[in-house]
Amino acid sequence: MPTAAIVFCLICLLGIIWRERKWRDEVERITRAAGLKIFESGTIVASFNTLRGDNQRLTKEEYLRRLFEALLHEIRQGVAIVDDQMRIKFVNRTLAHLFQKNGIQLGRTLIEEIQDHQITDVVQAALKDQRRTVREIELTSLGAGSSVATRHYLIEAAPLPAKAESGAWLMVHDTTEQVMAEQIRKDFVANASHELRTPLTLINGYIETLQSGVLLKDDAATQRCYGIMEKHGKRIVRIVEDMLTISRLENASSGLNIEPFTVRSCVQDSLDHLSSMMEGRDVRINVDFPADGGQIRGDRFYWDQVFTNLIENSLKENSTPGLVITLSGRWFSDHCLLKVSDNGIGIAAHDLPFVFKRFYRGHKHHSPEVKGTGLGLSIVRRAVEAHGGTIDLTSTPGVETTFAMRIPL
């Protein structure tokens, strides 16, 4: 049974119980105010039994009311019940949490507590039209460090059932994660298509040139065509491999192949793999790890990806002589701190929040010739997080750029 249907049933029952309880309380108040004249013992016994039965029924209703309220407090949707004047009669804890409030006061109007007309408009429309109303809204607020945060909500409201007193119920779903996931999916498909289209177009172009026969007698030009086609073919393979790597990291069921290994040996393998990129360049590599090489437990395949991508990123972005790349590690009682730093061009402040996004590449105005999949740093972050760690990036352009990874032991 869908959550919305369950919540709707609970709200209906809660409204009916409140109405019945209100009627019984009123009867008891009038009875006490008027007083009863008892003429015979049978009447006294009958009155006592009737009152006792009423009290038992009231106790059951109170128990059910509290049970329903407890259930509504535990669900992930925010729920409120208001009267026909939009005054709040019930609200669960989730609603206050969704709107980052310490609490919501009963008896006040919805606009006084929520302070957003988009939500009250939905409730008013439900009361006016006497039917269920659903809308999607966006709310923007200031987050930490004066950053702007936008959240997405699905708002549902409907009048209370006829057996209950007049008013409406309100349900708020936080759909921010779903909206962001859908946007990421769309961006990923669009960017992946673009990244694959470029090398495929070049390869097809050279194939057509070769098929035309124009270069049959020019062996040098033919070899250049083959070389370019091979280069872009490898680029396609790299994109696909990186996409598969991210997919495996995001698939919790795939798991990690955990084994002990030394970080220094992992770093050395990455340097050996990238040795061809460093040939003939003025690049100095500093490696600083404990005497035992610094041991951790993790998936060696992904850690090879981490260091290879970070070192390769530094080499690609810094073509000028004098580049110094430093790889270091420090071990503590419960975690280790791994760093990859360089003294190169750095990362602009406006690029910092986005460098770990898929297909994002900064410095386009500095180095337009730099080619890559744009997935390297995304893989780095996913791999570190898959091992329960965190990664932080700091950069002072022209001075130092550092990726710092804290890994629990």
Image (spheres, grey):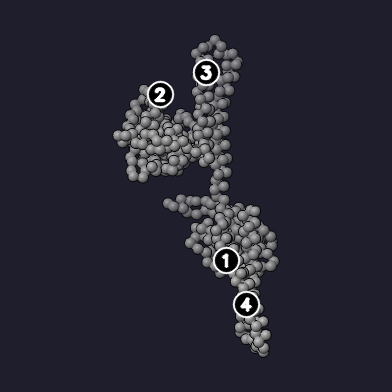
Secondary structure beneath disc 2? helix
Q: Nearer the viewer, mark 2 or mark 1?
A: 1
* Left or right: 247 as drawn, with respect to 28: left
Q: Name the amino acid type tagged 3.
A: Tyr
How far separated are the C-alphas under marks 2 and 3?
21 Å
Q: Nearer the viewer, mark 3 or mark 4?
A: 4
> Which of the two labelled residues, at mark 3 and mark 4, occupies the earlier sequence position?
4
> Which of the two labelled residues, at mark 2 and mark 3, occupies the earlier sequence position?
3
* Left or right: 187 as drawn, with respect to 352: right
Q: Nearer the viewer, mark 3 or mark 1?
A: 1
Q: Which residue is mark 4?
A: 52
Q: Which residue is mark 2?
A: 276
Residue 389: image x %, image y %?
42, 43
How many residues crowd mark 2 within 10 Å: few (<14), some (14–19), many (20+)?
Answer: few
Q: Residue at x 53, y 24 (%)?
A: 233
Which of the labelled discs sits on residue 226, or is there none? 3
How far separated are the C-alphas under marks 3 and 4?
96 Å
Q: Name the amino acid type tagged 4.
A: Arg
Residue 41: image x %, image y %?
65, 87
Which of the labelled discs sits on residue 66, or is there none? 1
